[in-house]
Amino acid sequence: MDPIADKLLISAALVSLVENRLAPAWAIVIILGREFAVTGLRSIAAAEGFTISASKKAKFKMLSQVIAITLLILGSVSGSAWGLLPPPEIKPDVSFSSFEESARVLSAAVRDGQISVEGLRVLSFGAGRFMLWIVVIFALWSMYDYFMKFYGKVRDKIEVRERRRLLRRRNRKAASTALSSAADTGKK
């Protein structure tokens, strides 16, 4: 139940990020689609009698998800009654606007030797968006990994079944041949 609870909690956070226009919907669809696909594969694998353990890529994806969500929320706390809003300088519909604005804030911080609270919001939001790209990449990569592990285990199981079937067929044929030989010998 623990992995399912983790998935539900992360899924709720990701969906709320889309609802508040803090994360692009296409990225969240990829991440959640991967979760459903991998959960389905693991269920099928369990029904077939084998397990597919979590890979290091999947664990890194989970860690980067938590970091991305945290950074996006920290960068969106505005102190207003409206709840979570992206920093005003960032256009939420433009994928890379947070990176451009983060670069601008960083260069100003280096030049001035200080950074404002609003600048920290922009940097946090930009870092969260960057981590979201990392999550998408690792979600796709780890999903591929799971599919390959699943395919390998299923292929091995199918090959074992096929060998057993062929062996039974040969044994039946040999037994049938032996019985017909014995019957022919008994007639003479």
Image (cartoon, grey):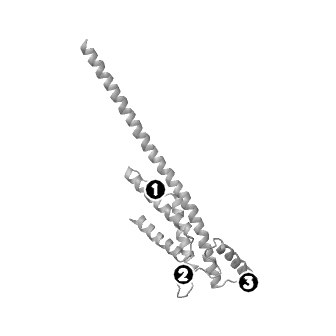
Q: Nearer the viewer, residue 48 or 115?
A: 48
Count of labels shown? Answer: 3
Q: Residues within 10 Å of mark 3 (few under 14, many from 20)?
A: few
User: Of the residues under marks 3 and 2, which one precedes in the sequence?
Assistant: 2
Question: Residue 20, relative to residue 168: is it above or below?
Answer: below
Amino acid type at mark 1 = Ser
Q: Local crowd at mark 1 within 10 Å, few (<14), some, or many (≥20)?
A: few
The residue that disc 1 covers is: 53
Q: Secondary structure at mark 1?
A: loop
Spatial CA distance of label 3 from label 1 is 50 Å
Residue at image mark 3: 112
Q: Amino acid at mark 3?
A: Asp
Q: Which mark is residue 28?
A: none
- The residue that mark 2 highlights is 84
Q: Within the image, what quadrant is residue 140 found in?
A: bottom right
Identify residue type, mark 2: Leu
Whether residue 147 is visible:
yes
Q: Quadrant of residue 57?
A: bottom right
